[in-house]
Image (cartoon, rainbow, N blue to C red):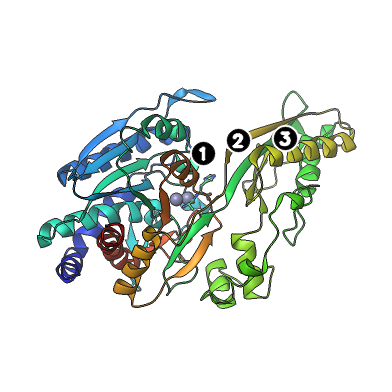
Amino acid sequence: MPHLPPFFSKVDELQGKFIERLSEAVAIPSISSEDARRPDVVKMGEWLAEQIRALGGEVELRQLGKQPGHEHLDLPPVLLGRYGSDPKKKTVLVYGHYDVQPAQTSDGWATDPFKLSIDDKDRMFGRGSTDDKGPVLGWLNAIEAHQKAGVDIPVNLLMCFEGMEENGSEGLDELIEAEAKSFFKDADVVCISDNYWLGTEKPCLTYGVRGCNYYSVEISGPGQDLHSGVYGGVTHEPMTDLVRIMNSLVDPDGKILIQGIDDLVAPLTDEEAALYPPIAFTMDDLHQSLGNQVSIYNDKNDALKHKMRYPSLSLHGIEGAFYTPGAKTVIPAKVIGKFSIRTVPNMEIDDVTKLVQKHVEQEFAKLKSKNNMKFNIVHVGKWWVEDPNHPNYTGAAKAVERVFGVKPDMTREGGSIPVTLTFQAQLQKNVLLLPMGSSTDAAHSINEKLDKKNYIEGTKLLGAYLHYVAGELS
Ligand SMILES: C[C@H](N)C(=O)N[C@@H](Cc1c[nH]cn1)C(=O)O
Ligand SMILES: [Zn+2]
Ligand SMILES: [Zn+2]
């Protein structure tokens, strides 16, 4: 691969510009789950489109109409881009997302979440730095470094960047289905950079994700919030009901308490169990990324299995609860509890939902409360597992070895990327997850960051992958 050294040198030379590009992106608070931020999500899509056009790519911002259930809101557009259309070359479809999770300084951030701040260890802090603005910009950086180094990109690139990934990817499945035989028809393989290494030193290739079924339980009763001194003891309290229901879902050791859920999980075979011990992952890696020694399991292999191949149930929050500092003596009139289940093979979305709904209804009935309970499905997305012996993976493994000098670990991601399954099913093409960020990046959390090294070497990796996958596919 004689073209790679000049490309790598150009990436190093341009790193200041690439960091500036990330800094501009982080400054746009494109939070897809907050209605008031929707204009910023749109602005982010437009900014990205301009960046790609400036590099010579063709871009369409495809409008998706109104957001189901929020008809006052337009969905952010999906960016469909193309760079190169040489019929002699193979075509790689890359996907990423330009929306981010919510963030406020008051959540506990050490710096402004929407201002990229670089510390003395070259850690670049900012919402979206690792999830997923850094990796998305990695593709653009790779194009620019090729151009400026005078190195031809050996594949055509199709780009699909969405603005609703953190909010259920609304509208995307329909778009992919509609465009499978038109915009996406030339794709030979799919590559997604939107997950994380298991530790901080060793890259990985990821061939599976867990699904995510997200639910809410709404309990309402009194006509308005009440004074707990005047009405405490004489009314059924929505919060008391809700806390009981939420408490019934999962135990402190992470065991899901909903009857029938465990029966849906594919049994662990000896062959699969043998995959975990060789993975370069230690309990120290886990504790470092958790920020404390609070792991449920003491054994690395148990921890890996519960990250990758067993389901989990997490309690996320209670809307309507009194949560600010102080001691307000209120009885909230309506509260909405939110929780999700990360699903794994062979859990079908609807089977899980039926069990969860039945459980919640039974638990509420046990309370004999006069309040009202509503169970809602917020969004769902299925798990995905891919064949890691495909040229898409062998090409990526060679790129990792070239850039990092090690063979990658083969992992399954505990998080969810709903579009993986849609691409696999609709395009019938192999899908690869090629992460840029590390386990300590704190995606979705306060102080999210991307290490400068991961961003710059990750840009080299994405570029090198295009060369190696072209070789493997030809
Ligand atoms: C792994 C990916 N970067 C990610 O963060 N995905 C989200 C997707 C999601 C599902 N429900 C809401 N967002 C995740 O795993 O939480
Ligand atoms: Zn995310
Ligand atoms: Zn993401």
Mark 3–mark 2 Cα distance, whole angstroms, equals 22 Å
Task: Using the image as rendered, state which of residue 361 and residue 30 is in the foreground.
Answer: 361
Task: Using the image as rendered, state which of residue 364 and residue 343 is in the foreground.
Answer: 343
Residue 260, given in percent of the width and then of the height, sits at 79, 47
Q: Is residue 319 above or below residue 402?
A: above
The answer to whether the residue labelled 3 contacts the one labelled 1, judged by CB atoms less than 8 Å apart, is: no
> Does residue 407 appear left or right of residue 56 in this picture?
right
Q: Which label lies toward us, 3 or 1?
A: 1
Identify which amino acid the numbered label 3 is placed on: Pro
Q: Is residue 362 above or below residue 402?
A: above
Residue sitting at 64 percent across and 63 percent down?
Answer: 306
Question: Mark on residue 168?
Answer: 1
Q: SS class of the residue under badge 2?
A: strand
Residue 470, given in percent of the width and then of the height, sits at 26, 58
Question: Mark on residue 193?
Answer: none
Mark 2–mark 1 Cα distance, whole angstroms, equals 8 Å
How many neighbours does mark 3 have within 10 angstroms: few (below 14), some (14-19), or many (20 or more)?
many
The answer to whether the residue labelled 2 contacts the one labelled 1, judged by CB atoms less than 8 Å apart, is: yes
Q: Is residue 373 above or below residue 414?
A: above
| Residue at image mark 2 | 378
Q: Earlier in the sequence, mark 3 or mark 1?
A: 1
Residue sitting at 61 percent across and 73 percent down?
Answer: 274
Q: Mark 1 vs ligand 1: CB under 8 Å?
A: yes
Question: Mark on residue 332?
Answer: 3
> Does residue 473 appear left or right of residue 201 in this picture?
left
Q: Earlier in the sequence, mark 3 or mark 2?
A: 3
Mark 3–mark 1 Cα distance, whole angstroms, equals 28 Å
